[in-house]
Image: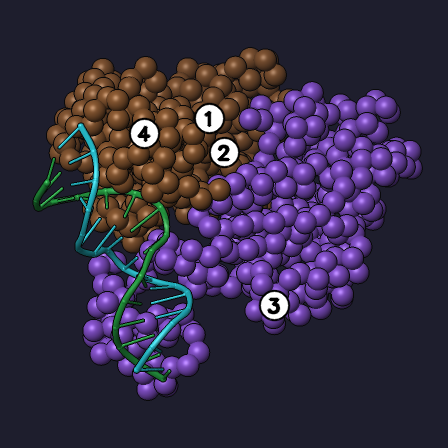
Chain colours: A brown, B purple, C green, D cyan
Amino acid sequence: MGKTTLQDVAREAGVSLATVDRVLNGRAGVHARTVEKVQAAVDRLNYQPDRMASRLARGRDYRFEIILPIGSNEFMRVLETEFRATAERYVHERVLLNITLVDVFDGEALANALEALPAEIDGVAVVALDHPAVAEAINTIADRGIAVVTLVSDLPGTRRAHFVGIDNSAAGRTAASLLGRFLGHRSGKVGLIAGSLALRDHIERQYGFEQVVAREYPDLEVLPVREGRDEDDRVRRVAEALLAEHEDLVGIYNVGAGTPGVVTALEKTGHTRDIVFVAHELTAINRRNLIRGSIDAIINQDPGHMARSAARILLAMREGMEIVPGQERIKIDIFIRDNVP
Amino acid sequence: MGKTTLQDVAREAGVSLATVDRVLNGRAGVHARTVEKVQAAVDRLNYQPDRMASRLARGRDYRFEIILPIGSNEFMRVLETEFRATAERYVHERVLLNITLVDVFDGEALANALEALPAEIDGVAVVALDHPAVAEAINTIADRGIAVVTLVSDLPGTRRAHFVGIDNSAAGRTAASLLGRFLGHRSGKVGLIAGSLALRDHIERQYGFEQVVAREYPDLEVLPVREGRDEDDRVRRVAEALLAEHEDLVGIYNVGAGTPGVVTALEKTGHTRDIVFVAHELTAINRRNLIRGSIDAIINQDPGHMARSAARILLAMREGMEIVPGQERIKIDIFIRDNVP
DNA sequence: CTGTTAGCGCTTTCAA
DNA sequence: TTGAAAGCGCTAACAG
């Protein structure tokens, strides 16, 4: 029961309301002995603060910064839209979400954006590139007392408090399973296209994929990964090269964005039926291609879920809720032709 | 901005706080002309109530009833656990979730349980059987002013306010796609086992399944559905019969619960490798069998998500938020051997 | 039918 | 270093 209130604690500790508030919120200027007395009372009564009341009384807004990749990557655009929707919902609860777009493929730029953040902000969610400058920037602002949450692509080893995203190794393993089973033990080569080898989520997917192919589908040969920068056109050229160079290509796994590029390549060369193509992220464009049959399966991370989770975690950390640092795993959805929403 | 408060509206309308509160919460005893004045002021100022403040001030608890099937159906037990967890989280927000277990396969019993609900409760979530008595009971309590939400299995045509669950036709279609593609165009018979033909979710899955097989996999013959009552033992016997009667059986789709029964049948007859088996609900037991290879794919509805959604909707309806009556679609998750969590 | 008033549990000046 | 008191936006008696 949330029955015990601040009042009860104050009485029990023999101090005033304000003092209890001070120790509970770690505000300075309280005698060590008093702190202890209050702590003891809190424990004894098993006091649980009422967040509704506290938010009401505070009046001030929370400010969070969301840093997303700029560019044509459709998934990121959807994610942005979801964050805007989340922001709207939260506006009535006194929390402000500000969205900033930066070039994530440029480590220095990302690091600068991070360090340029005003000191008053309460937290930041960022799609992180695996670059030394970025890691350093994250540590810097984390030390400044800002809660940092990595989004989509993690940066373990830094002092980020949380990661919100899918289990990318599992996603890669799933891609391999799907591709392998859809192929029905045909043998041949499989091409992999990633956005960048400095994007940890892509690398993890690749590892997961290769691991399952090695174990379960030894008749398949995984070609060396190529980079497509998550841009349709660049990805298309990579796919075309793959198709031209390997006549025994039986499958393609697009690890990152730019799926329409692969579709174009497949269509132009007339390979939509005989090459199994597994992609990521269900966007409007991918959805259409899935239904038309140019994509065999899509492995998805739900952008709405991610945006809401990130906002919730950022807020929870600021409100002093007990958040176990670590990660919030967003579930993987799989779409095949007949279950697209 | 949620800047405008009740005060502002009161001033603008030239009435008191209490009167605004009355019209906003639809309480009786307000002159029609006053109501209009207030409404006008609300519209003019685009007033948005502050739910935190209102919950704080109200003090009273909301009471919701959750009615779930009793029995060994593991998915339902997990759903129950999730509801208990949700209840715990909500206790600090002044909402009480009470869980009642009934035999859902017994329409009369379910209807009685529904009608026996105390009049003071604010809402109920129920896994509905497609039975006339149940439909009537739902209408009765809905007319009594209680918000009714159907869970997992819907009952359209009644005055239930909302349905929380997956798109079961899509689930059935997905099962067919997976089974068909995993079979790689082998031909033969496919057996379907449902819990009961009076469970609408099972029927919808069956339809979706048959539709895709007819359209995409004409070499597959879908056998008439059989009922397994969602009980492991009964399901096992049905599966054994299927196996014994059709030597050209190539696939099984278990539409409802009782999946361990199918696994046992498959193992005893040595058919774990050559028969493709698609099941529903990722529970601890199913998970193990998936990894061991006795199940080829699992289509899941996330019980945690369902419990949280149901609670949220029930609450939102009571707090007068604008909830579009209809359905809250829970996403379908697909699990295959390499992505089980 | 309508207004006044006292809180809900917490934060935040402002004094002491 | 601590306490008293005034709200935050809303609800709910209780008067009028």
Chain identity of mark 2: A
| Front residue of B319 and A39 | A39
Circles 1 and 4, Cβ within 8 Å, touching? The answer is: no
Do tags 4 and 2 sit on the same chain?
Answer: yes
User: Can you say whether B142 is above or below A74 in the image?
Assistant: below
Neighbour class for label 1 at 10 Å: few (<14), some, many (≥20)?
A: many
Tell which circle, 4 or 2, labels the residue nearer the N-terminal end.
4
Q: Residue at x 73, y 39 (%)?
A: B73
Q: Amino acid at mark 3?
A: Ala
Q: Residue at x 33, y 42 (%)?
A: A7
Circles 3 and 1, Cβ within 8 Å, touching? The answer is: no
Chain identity of mark 1: A
Q: Amino acid at mark 4?
A: Val
Q: Which residue is mark 2?
A: A332
Neighbour class for label 4 at 10 Å: few (<14), some, many (≥20)?
A: many
Is there any visible trace of residue A226 in the rendered image?
Answer: no
Q: Can you give x and y, in whole percent of width and height, for residue A113 in the image?
A: 16, 30
Do tags 3 and 2 sit on the same chain?
Answer: no
Is there any visible trace of residue B49 in the rendered image?
Answer: yes
Q: Residue at x 78, y 28 (%)?
A: B263
Do tags 1 and 4 sit on the same chain?
Answer: yes
Q: Which mark is residue A38?
A: 4
As drawn, is B296 to the left or to the right of A33? right
Q: Amino acid at mark 1?
A: Asp
CA gap, disc 2 to disc 1? 8 Å
Q: Which residue is mark 3?
A: B142
Q: Which residue is mark 1?
A: A167
> Looking at the image, is mark 4 or mark 3 nearer the viewer?
4
Circles 4 and 3, Cβ within 8 Å, touching? The answer is: no
Circles 2 and 1, Cβ within 8 Å, touching? The answer is: yes
Chain identity of mark 3: B
